[in-house]
Image: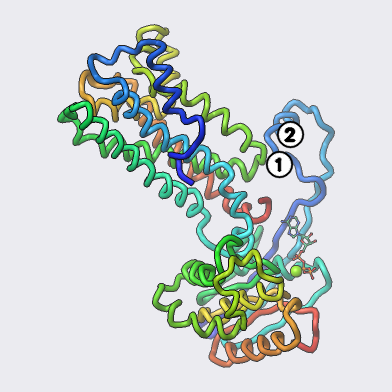
């Protein structure tokens, strides 16, 4: 161990697809008395027996067709959802940026969300304060930082989200293909930042459909 | 938005109801009697009402960031507690106004406040986890809250139930955790005879609801992000 950041063994994740049975009390009761015909739900393995290891300081890109399970893998790694089978071992604080709309509270301002996210990541107020200016500068949305994030454009949203995730000094940075909505200049800046983060001995794991980025 | 600002406030209902059935309070001013029950009940019903939809309301965060999900119903408990304290302060003001001295039992009041919190959290945790599984559970909650007000000794003493109804019904009545808690809290403020020994049932229910609520929540936590 020591220099392995993420280790995944026989990881599998099962979803139920089709019309999922009983998401309501009414239906459950009806099922109980056999009042509805059997639902056509099926098991679906979004991830099946995945094994890999990622070392500290590595930047790893993941590609795959739509629905391949990339986002699901990242969700499992960030502990949002639980694996059905297998185990993952993660060494270090994880910060993740999953799909659009990452963990911001729409009614709070950009500034408040920075503090909220930092706190959730387990940072103290002082630590966040010391990073605050850098985050705002990197995102390039100083003007809107006191506006509720629900009024942000999707690009601005991602700018802020990326800046927060990248600057809160996680040992492991997980990024889904959110950067696609950022403009070319910002995407470049992000790639640079990801390289820099990895250079500091941290680990970056990201999903992209753009082979050049990888 | 707190519990103090609901329209058609149940306190009005309680005052009218109490007058109408002419509750015997043994010389205690009725508003004091009723507010003792209302303080605990309002906190309990606030958590009931708020917890149900809490997880669904926070689904954006649940799907995007990791944090212990139990924080969601717990945070509702904190918000409600501030209002709980305000109502207790109102009760104190009312007692000064009526120049009513609390009984020495008042030292036990914190215990009953604590059990109120445990019961309310217990029910809140259950409801928040159940609504993830059964979306339409949210619509059941308002009825439970309505019914609960009648089924708790807020406007009248629980003794009324014990005197008028057969023992098995009293037994059922005390399965409502708020029955014993309200009686206990009122006893600590007003004094008088000890609450009926059935109250222990309420306390046991409170702890059962709370512990099994956490267990159930922990189980649901594993699938929350997938099905919410
Ligand atoms: N909560 C869920 N319930 C049921 N099925 C799900 C759930 N989440 C994902 N899936 C299914 O799992 C599969 C993998 O989804 P995932 O989002 O991981 O794909 P992806 O590789 O990120 O695709 P894309 O390139 O489009 O982003 C899909 O078929 C999807 O329908
Ligand atoms: Mg995806």
Q: Chain of mark 1?
A: A
In this view, the residue in front, B182 or B200, is B182
A154 left or right, relative to A41: left
Q: Residue at x 50, y 58 (%)?
A: B68
In front: B200, or B157?
A: B157
Q: How many angstroms separate mark 1 from mark 2 (CA)? A: 7 Å
B107, above or below A49, in the image:
above
Callout 1 crowding tier (Cα within 10 Å): few <14, some 14–19, many ≥20: some
Q: List the residue tagged with mark 1.
A: A23
Which residue does the image show at 63% across and 87% down from the upper left?
A: A194
What is the quadrant of residue A178 in the picture?
Answer: bottom right
SS at mark 1 in the image: loop
Q: Are marks 1 and 2 in contact (CB under 8 Å)?
A: yes
Q: Which element type, helix, strand or loop, lies under badge 2?
A: helix
Residue at x 38%, y 27% (from the top left corner): B202
How many marks do you count on the picture? 2
Res. B212 mark: none
Residue at image mark 2: A27
> What subunit carries mark 2?
A
Of all residues, the one furthest to the front in this rendering is: B97
Residue sitting nearer the eye, A2 or A80: A80
Q: Pick the quarter of the image with the C terminus of chain A.
A: bottom right
Q: Position of residue B81 (x, y in %)?
A: 38, 45
Does the closest atom of ligand 1 sit within 8 Å of the Cβ of label 1? Answer: no
Would you say A37 lies left or right of B161 here? right
Find out if the beta carbon at label 2 lies less than 8 Å from the nearest ligand 1 atom: no
Q: Position of residue A59 (x, y in %)?
A: 65, 86
Residue A51: name its quadrant: bottom right
Q: Is residue B119 above or below residue A82?
A: above
């Amino acid at each position: 161990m020591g220099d392995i950041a993420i280790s995944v063994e026989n990881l599998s994740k099962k979803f139920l697809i089709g019309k999922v049975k009983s998401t309501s009390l009414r239906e459950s009761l009806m099922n109980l008395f056999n009042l509805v015909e059997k639902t056509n739900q099926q098991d679906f393995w979004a991830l099946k027996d995945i094994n890999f290891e990622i070392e500290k300081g590595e930047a790893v890109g993941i590609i795959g067709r739509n629905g391949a399970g990339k986002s699901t893998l990242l969700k499992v790694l960030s502990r949002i959802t639980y694996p059905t089978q297998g185990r993952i071992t993660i060494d270090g604080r994880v910060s993740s940026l999953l799909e659009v709309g990452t963990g911001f509270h729409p009614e709070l301002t950009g500034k408040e969300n920075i503090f909220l996210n930092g706190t959730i990541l387990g940072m103290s107020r002082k630590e966040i304060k010391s990073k605050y200016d850098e985050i705002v500068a990197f995102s390039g949305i100083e003007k809107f930082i006191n506006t509720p994030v629900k009024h942000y454009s999707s690009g601005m949203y991602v700018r802020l989200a990326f800046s927060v995730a990248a600057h809160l000094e996680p040992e492991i940075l997980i990024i889904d293909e959110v950067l696609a909505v950022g403009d070319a200049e910002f995407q470049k800046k992000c790639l640079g930042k990801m390289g820099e983060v990895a250079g500091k001995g941290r680990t970056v794991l990201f999903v992209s459909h753009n082979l050049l980025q990888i | 938005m707190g519990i103090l600002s609901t329209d058609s406030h149940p306190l009005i209902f309680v005052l009218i109801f109490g007058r109408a059935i002419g509750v015997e309070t043994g010389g205690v001013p009725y508003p004091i009697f009723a507010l003792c029950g209302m303080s605990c009940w309002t906190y309990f019903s606030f958590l009931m009402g708020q917890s149900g939809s809490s997880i669904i309301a926070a689904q954006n965060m649940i799907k995007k960031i990791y944090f212990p999900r139990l924080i969601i119903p717990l945070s509702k408990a904190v918000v409600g507690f501030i209002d709980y304290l305000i109502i207790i302060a109102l009760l104190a003001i009312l007692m000064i106004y009526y120049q009513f001295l609390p009984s020495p039992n008042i030292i036990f009041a914190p215990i009953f406040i604590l059990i109120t919190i445990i019961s309310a959290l217990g029910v809140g945790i259950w409801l928040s986890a159940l609504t993830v599984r059964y979306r339409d559970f949210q619509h059941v909650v308002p009825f439970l809250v309505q019914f609960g007000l009648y089924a708790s000794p807020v406007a009248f003493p629980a003794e009324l139930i014990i005197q008028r109804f057969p023992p098995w019904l009293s037994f059922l009545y005390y399965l409502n955790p708020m029955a014993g808690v309200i009686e206990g809290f009122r006893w600590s403020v007003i004094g008088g005879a000890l609450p009926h020994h059935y109250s222990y049932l309420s306390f046991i229910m409170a702890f059962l609801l709370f512990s099994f609520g956490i267990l159930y929540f922990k189980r649901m936590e594993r699938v929350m992000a997938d099905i919410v």
